[in-house]
Amino acid sequence: MAKSARIMERSLNTGRIPEPASTTMPGKVDKIISSRRRKHSEKAQIGVDRASRRYRSLRIENSLTDENGDEVKLKKGARVEVTVAAEGKASTSRIVKDRQPARRQTRASTEGHENAR
């Protein structure tokens, strides 16, 4: 099936709910960084396990909201999941072309065919 046909098929499928492109990686809170100023909030430094060495450390504000709407904070050593999501047209799709398996005749199958005549 051609790439344009697959794109059209996906766009015509009304039951399909498009989700943003995303990836999730495990991580661990390496340290909690307190702020010297009151107006700046506390930060949590997260080490992302599967990221490139140069980009493993990530610092976020240590003020999160749980499922009940309460404010919570991360503790040092806590295991976390880091999810990165792209919105709208900020990502590109990669469509793999359909490949037809190559048909090869082996010597044995050719010989058997000749003997049948």
Image (spheres, helix red, strand yellow):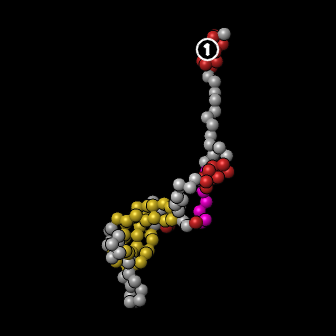
Residue 65 colored in magenta in the image: no
Identify which amino acid the numbered label 1 is placed on. Answer: Gly
Looking at the image, which is closer to me, 59 or 87?
A: 87
Looking at the image, which is closer to me, 76 or 81?
A: 81
Can I make out residue 2 in this image?
Answer: yes
Q: Position of residue 10 (x, y in %)?
A: 59, 53
Q: Position of residue 103 (x, y in %)?
A: 64, 29
Looking at the image, which is closer to me, 82 or 116?
A: 116
| Quarter of the picture holding the N terminus | top right
Image position of 16 with respect to 59: above or below: above
| Quarter of the picture holding the C terminus | top right
Name the element at disc 1: helix
Can I make out residue 74 in this image?
Answer: no
Q: Position of residue 73 (x, y in %)?
A: 34, 75
**Residue 60 quadrant:** bottom left
Mark 1 crowdedness (10 Å alpha carbons): few <14, some 14-19, many ≥20? few
Question: Which residue is painted at 38% across and 75% down in the image?
Answer: 64
Q: How many marks?
A: 1
Question: Which residue is painted at 63% across and 24% down in the image?
Answer: 105
Looking at the image, which is closer to me, 44 or 52?
A: 44
**3 lies left or right of 63:** right
Farthest bottom residue in view: 38
Give the magenta part as a residue range: 89-95
Question: Which residue is painted at 63% across and 27% down in the image?
Answer: 104
Question: Which residue is painted at 61% across and 60% down in the image?
Answer: 92
Magenta region, main secondary structure: loop
Q: Which residue has dot 1 on it? A: 112
Image position of 82 with respect to 42: above or below: above
Q: Position of residue 96 (x, y in %)?
A: 61, 48
